[in-house]
Each structure stands twice: as structure tokens, then as C-alpha cells.
Amino acid sequence: ELNPIEQFWALVKRKLKRGCMMTEENLSSRIADACNQVLINDLYGFASHSKRQIMNCYNKTPM
């Protein structure tokens, strides 16, 4: 995945799936909690991964 925001939401969804079934009422707070659990190092990792993939495409490196 080249888009860092997609990587972010994939991580948030994994964090949400670890919990029990949720009601609509607590879904918003669970999403906010999962977002707050994403570390700055995760964000750097998303950006680095995207940069590597873009450079591979630019350099026509076989995947």
C-alpha cells in the first residue's frame, strides 16, 4: 500500500478487532482510543514504507 493513511486505518481496524463486539454508542470512543494508540514510530514507518515503494516504482525495481 502506497498511501500512508490507508496503512494508518488498517492498524486502527486491527486494534478495534481485538476488542469485544461494540455498540454504536461506544464505537466512536473505541475508534478514538485506537487512533490514540498509534505511535509516532508507526507513522514514521508508514511514511518510510510508502517512500521505499515509490522509489522502487520510480527505479523500476521488480517487486
Image (cartoon, rainbow, N blue to C red):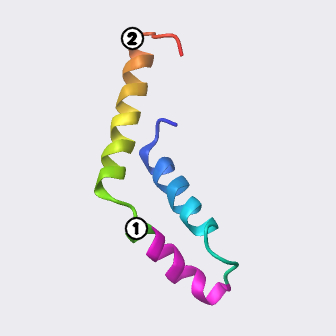
**Relative height, residue 29 to residue 49 (above, below):** below
Q: Residue at x 39, y 62 (%)?
A: 38
Q: Quadrant of the C terminus?
A: top right
Q: Secondary structure at mark 1?
A: loop
Q: Nearer the viewer, mark 2 or mark 1?
A: 1
**Residue 28 painted magenta:** yes
Q: CA distance from mark 2 to mark 1?
A: 35 Å
Among the 4 quarters of the image, the one containing residue 24: bottom right
In the displayed structure, does residue 59 sit left or right of residue 1?
A: left
> Three-letter amino acid code at disc 2?
Asn
> Three-letter amino acid code at disc 1?
Gln
**Secondary structure of the magenta portion, mostly?**
helix
Q: Assess disc 1: are there few (<14), some (14-19) or many (≥20) residues with their C-alpha within 10 Å of its C-alpha.
A: few
**Relative height, residue 52 to residue 42 (above, below):** above
Q: Residue at x 29, y 56 (%)?
A: 40
**Residue 49 painted magenta:** no
**Relative height, residue 36 to residue 3 (above, below):** below
Residue 2 image position (x, y, % from top left): 47, 35
Residue 12 image position (x, y, % from top left): 51, 62
Q: Secondary structure at mark 2?
A: loop
Identify the mark at residue 37; answer none if there is no mark. 1
Magenta segment: 23-34
From the image, tell me which residue sits under label 2. Answer: 59
**Relative height, residue 28 to residue 62 (above, below):** below
Residue 3 image position (x, y, % from top left): 46, 41
Q: Camera-side residue: 2 or 63?
A: 63
